[in-house]
Image (spheres, helix red, strand yellow):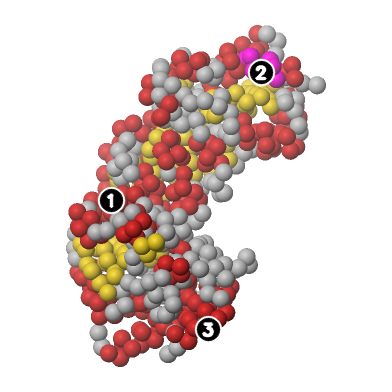
């Protein structure tokens, strides 16, 4: 990717991260860690990869996105807001009782949200249905789903993995946020769902490894997914939970907690251009 | 003797009819196509049938994805797995986004028969009824089942339909009018109102005959839609008859009996006796025999109706 474009995407991702912090700080609750870890991936998806139009969020020909790990709504909302689906200012209403920005994404309320999610393990199945539908229509739109590494402990993820491979859903691309931490601690210590690569390969998927914070690596992974025919692709994106905010990085305490005023200042300072 | 047809057979046939009428009808199953009768659709429209394997939770999600992209999916498995195993998927992935998914759940209730308790779902009306925006229905015969499937495809929003394994008498003729959310009074009477659905409708009709011989005029209502319940009709029955007996092949907790009692006690408080599976699991046995064993046959309805009449002030 050209250096100029990388710089532009980095700046967008920085603003999206600021939006995440603003939203969680205003709400005094939410999930910053796994939102910050996916900020670069979502930036790439919404600004480079996906065919979506904020002026026509319900376009039937659009690509679809399912945030299967719905608790990371801040990264989705911030990305959608910066892309122009709704005002960035509204991020400050996140999780408030009069806001359309619910704690977990609600497709009925938020422009640009393609699926309501929150109960873990369910989004990949929905993405499978969308991809199957596009195949039935012989349409060329693509479907994307972001999963958590902890979320992959849910059995339904593997039911969906079986389904996607059986029906040759090569228009489906899953992204696994491999940040290594879940609420109860390191994923490897809680129950140890890894290795993800050989598991998904065994289920019949095309597996691509990527650095979730390197736009060249991200670009190569999505290009690989698009050019792979006959099977679905999963991008196993090695990431840093809390990426970009010094005290949140690789710290499980920030899975689902909001910064106080002092911590908020540090976070905003860390994210200065 | 009326034709004996299981409502699951009518479901399968109706899907084939719908498939011819609309190209956006798709059918999903979880390795039970022969039993749920979606196999008929599979044969007629193989390109629009998708077996999900024994993975009901994924099936519900796939149905949602299809519905959000312009298809009308019918997802089928046994009631136990549709409403029981997949409750969270039905609530969060189908109910919360108000997805246009139609769940065709077969093998509801104890008339599953020999397979026994693990497969006899007596809780589905109660579970499905608690989900906001969910339409919950149970067909009494093959005619009604067919019309129900057609009506479900015409409406926007999630629908749960229960069909039975056991062959039941065909009660209605071709001019039978079916409307979602409307009960139908099949027998006029003022002494006691028997409100039933599913296999219990034919038992209730027999019970009304038996009661008549004893000088009790029972009204019989077929309440195929459990949610939204036909409040007006329930209130009318309560006012006119002064007591109600509900009959369903479902737990006495939370199903049709619960729905009727909720309306009655908040509007026209009169005795409501709930006939259903008491707070217990089912068991193996021939379906018809189980209906008697669990106190769901015409004789049991008669006894309950007399109890209700005795409670009237």
Between marks 2 and 1, how big is the CA–CA gap?
51 Å
Specify the farthest residue to the top. B213
Residue at the spot of label 1: A163
Tell which subunit mark 1 falls on: A
Tag 2 and tag 1 share a subunit: no
Question: Which image quarter: residue A7?
Answer: bottom left
Tell which subunit mark 3 falls on: A
Q: Residue at x 24, y 59 (%)?
A: A195
Q: Closer to us: mark 2 or mark 1?
A: 1
Residue B87 is labelled as none
- Residue A197 as seen in the image, left or right of residue B256: left
* Percent coordinates x, y for residue A190 in the rendering: 36, 56
Between marks 1 and 3, how big is the CA–CA gap?
46 Å
* Percent coordinates x, y for residue A188 in the rendering: 31, 59
Residue A265 is labelled as 3
Query: Are circles 3 and 2 on residues that touch, CB within 8 Å?
Result: no
- In this picture, which residue range is highlighted in magenta? B302-308
Residue at the spot of label 2: B305
């Amino acid at each position: 990717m050209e250096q100029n474009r990388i710089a532009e995407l980095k700046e967008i991702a920085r603003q999206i991260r600021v939006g995440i912090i603003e939203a969680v700080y205003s709400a005094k609750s939410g999930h910053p860690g796994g939102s910050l870890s996916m900020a670069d991936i979502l930036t790439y998806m919404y600004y480079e990869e996906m065919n979506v139009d904020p002026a026509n969020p319900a376009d039937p020909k659009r690509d679809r996105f399912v945030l299967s790990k719905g608790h990371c709504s801040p990264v989705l909302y911030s990305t959608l807001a910066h892309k122009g689906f709704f005002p960035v200012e509204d991020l400050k209403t996140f999780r408030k009782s009069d806001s359309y920005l619910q704690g977990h994404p609600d497709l009925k309320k938020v422009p640009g949200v393609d699926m309501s999610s929150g109960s873990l393990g369910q989004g990949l199945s929905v993405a499978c249905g969308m991809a199957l539908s596009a195949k039935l229509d012989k349409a060329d739109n693509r479907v994307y789903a972001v999963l958590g590494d902890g979320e992959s402990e849910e059995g339904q993820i593997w039911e969906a993995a079986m389904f996607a491979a059986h029906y040759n859903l090569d228009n489906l691309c899953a992204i696994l946020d491999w940040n290594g931490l879940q609420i109860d601690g390191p994923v490897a210590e809680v129950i140890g769902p890894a290795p993800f690569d050989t598991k998904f390969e065994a289920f019949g998927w095309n597996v691509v490894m990527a650095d979730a914070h390197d736009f060249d690596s991200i670009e190569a992974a999505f290009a690989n997914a698009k050019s792979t025919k006959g099977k679905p692709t999963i991008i196993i994106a090695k990431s840093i939970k809390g990426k970009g905010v010094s005290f949140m990085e690789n710290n499980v305490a920030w899975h689902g907690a909001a910064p106080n005023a002092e911590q908020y200042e540090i976070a905003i300072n860390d994210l200065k251009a | 003797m009326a034709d004996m047809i299981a409502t699951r057979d009518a479901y399968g046939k109706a899907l084939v009819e719908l498939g011819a009428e609309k190209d956006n009808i798709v059918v999903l199953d979880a390795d039970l196509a022969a039993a749920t009768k979606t196999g008929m659709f599979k044969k007629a429209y193989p390109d629009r049938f998708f077996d999900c394997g024994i993975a009901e939770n994924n099936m519900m999600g796939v149905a949602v994805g299809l519905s959000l992209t312009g298809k009308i999916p019918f997802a089928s498995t046994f009631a136990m797995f549709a409403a029981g195993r997949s409750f969270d998927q039905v609530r969060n992935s189908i109910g919360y986004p108000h997805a246009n998914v139609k769940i065709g759940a077969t093998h509801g209730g104890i008339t599953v028969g020999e397979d026994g308790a693990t497969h006899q779902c007596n809780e589905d009306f109660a579970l499905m009824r608690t989900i906001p925006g969910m339409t919950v229905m149970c067909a009494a015969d093959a005619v009604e089942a067919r019309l129900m499937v057609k009506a479900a495809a015409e409406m926007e929003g999630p629908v749960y339909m229960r069909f039975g394994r056991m062959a039941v008498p065909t009660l209605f003729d071709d001019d039978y009018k079916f409307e979602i959310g409307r009960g139908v009074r099949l027998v006029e009477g003022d002494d006691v109102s028997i409100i039933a659905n599913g296999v219990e409708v034919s038992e209730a009709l027999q019970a009304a005959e038996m009661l008549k011989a004893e000088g009790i005029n029972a009204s019989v209502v077929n309440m195929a839609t459990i949610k939204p319940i036909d409040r007006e009709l329930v209130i009318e029955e309560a006012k006119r008859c002064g007591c109600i007996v509900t009959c369903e092949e479902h737990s006495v907790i939370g199903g049709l009996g619960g729905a009727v009692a909720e309306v009655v006690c908040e509007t026209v408080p009169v005795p409501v006796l709930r006939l259903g599976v008491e707070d217990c699991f089912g068991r193996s046995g021939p379906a018809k025999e189980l209906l008697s064993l669990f106190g769901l046959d015409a004789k049991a309805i008669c006894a309950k109706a007399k109890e209700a009449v005795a409670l009237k002030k």
